[in-house]
């Protein structure tokens, strides 16, 4: 409000600056507004912002509005150049390309598939290996043809390393969530997955397993140092035809794995599979 005094009566009257809530000189909106007043200049707030002056100019560090178009980044809740003021770990997925040694982050996409409980997804193709960590719970992460490392955060997750040698690190399940690990050899690729944090109600699905044809053998203490465990080797086309898929259950012996895990075969839409469930 601007205050003026009439010469004849000494009475005061107020004039609201258009678009402002503080006093000033009528006709010069915001001239006497002190930081961090949120109005004034151009007689209105910044579009999509709650700060004043030139858009973003009086926004404190880390503010998520103002600047340029005065709107949030698509798919994000921070402003400025996309990601410029985002705190570390804000994006849904943290990514390192182990082939090019470059790192970054990505929001992935909203999961729209048939599996209930999943919220976000991130996948890639190609031969470069990647290390991907979810920063959100309940994610579907699908790897490419390279050697990948994938880690879930919490909730219910589906982790698929794709072809190659992969580390699949499930969540601990402290929040009641469970993880499903996909091993897919339907296209003739060879896979060796090391599954970490395999706990009650987790499951492994081997796609391409043919009941009555495919063969399974077990070895104890197999895999790489630090993550050795019971390892199931699967020959999709029958015994003696060559191993197509291996799954190492890190930290478990063959006796523990066989006593805790139940299995069943089936087919969905012509896609055969072996389903292995940790019964606890």
Image (cartoon, rainbow, N blue to C red):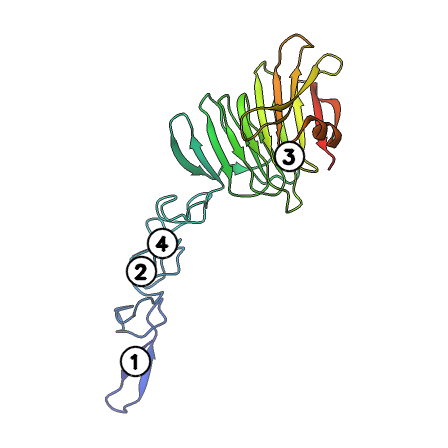
Find residue 53 and report its horizontal and vertical position in percent. 30, 61
Query: Who comes first in sequence, dot 2 or dot 1?
Result: 1
Q: Is residue 135 left or right of residue 96?
A: right
Considering the numbered disc 4 on the image, is that residue within a helix, a strand or a loop?
A: loop
> Rounded to the nearest whole Å, what is the CA distance between mark 4 and mark 1?
31 Å
**Residue that protrudes farthest toward the top in the picture:** 240
Residue 259 quadrant: top right
Residue at the (39%, 49%) spot, across then down: 79
> Rounded to the nearest whole Å, what is the CA distance between mark 3 and mark 1?
72 Å
Residue at the (35%, 68%) spot, across then down: 20
Label 3: which residue?
A: 198
Q: Is residue 220 left or right of residue 141?
A: right
Query: Who comes first in sequence, dot 2 or dot 3?
Result: 2
Label 4: which residue?
A: 66
Query: Who comes first in sequence, dot 4 or dot 1?
Result: 1
Considering the numbered disc 2 on the image, is that residue within a helix, a strand or a loop?
A: loop
Q: Are marks 3 and 4 in contact (CB under 8 Å)?
A: no
> Rounded to the nearest whole Å, what is the CA distance between mark 4 and mark 2?
9 Å
Q: Nearer the viewer, residue 118 or 98?
A: 98
Query: Who comes first in sequence, dot 4 or dot 2?
Result: 2
Query: Who comes first in sequence, dot 3 or dot 1?
Result: 1
Q: Which mark is residue 58?
A: 2
Residue 113 quadrant: top right
Q: Is residue 185 visible?
A: no
Find residue 51 and report its horizontal and vertical position in percent. 36, 61
Closer to viewer: mark 2 or mark 3: 3
Q: Which mark is residue 3?
A: 1
Residue at the (59%, 15%) spot, across then down: 187
**Residue that protrudes farthest toward the bottom in the picture:** 9
Other-residue count near label 4 (Cα within 10 Å), few / some / many at <14 / 14–19 / ≥20 = many
Query: Who comes first in sequence, dot 3 or dot 4?
Result: 4
């Amino acid at each position: 409000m601007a205050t003026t005094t009439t010469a004849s009566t000494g009475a005061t009257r107020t004039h609201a600056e258009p678009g402002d809530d503080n006093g000033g000189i009528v006709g010069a909106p915001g001239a006497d507004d002190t930081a961090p007043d949120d109005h004034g200049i151009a007689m209105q707030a910044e579009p999509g912002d709650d700060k004043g002056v030139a858009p973003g100019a009086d926004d404190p560090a880390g503010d998520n509005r103002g600047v340029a178009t005065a709107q949030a980044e698509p798919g994000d809740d921070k402003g400025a150049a996309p990601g410029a003021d985002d705190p570390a770990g804000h994006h849904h997925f943290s990514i390192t390309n182990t082939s090019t040694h470059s790192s970054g982050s990505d929001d992935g996409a909203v999961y729209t598939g048939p599996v209930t409980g999943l919220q976000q997804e991130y996948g890639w193709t190609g031969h470069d290996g990647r290390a991907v960590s979810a920063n959100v719970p309940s994610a579907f992460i699908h790897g490419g043809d390279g050697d990948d490392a994938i880690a879930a955060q919490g909730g219910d997750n589906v982790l698929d390393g794709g072809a190659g040698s992969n580390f699949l690190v499930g969540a601990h399940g402290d929040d009641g969530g469970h993880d499903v690990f996909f091993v897919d050899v339907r296209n003739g690729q060879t896979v060796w997955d090391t599954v970490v944090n395999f706990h009650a109600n987790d499951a492994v699905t081997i796609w391409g397993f043919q009941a009555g044809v495919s063969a399974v053998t077990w070895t104890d203490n197999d895999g790489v140092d630090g993550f050795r465990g019971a390892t199931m080797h699967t020959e999709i086309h029958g015994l003696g035809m060559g191993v197509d898929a291996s799954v190492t259950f890190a930290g478990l012996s063959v006796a523990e794995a066989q006593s805790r895990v139940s299995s069943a075969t089936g087919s969905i839409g012509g896609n055969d599979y072996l389903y292995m469930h940790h019964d606890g």
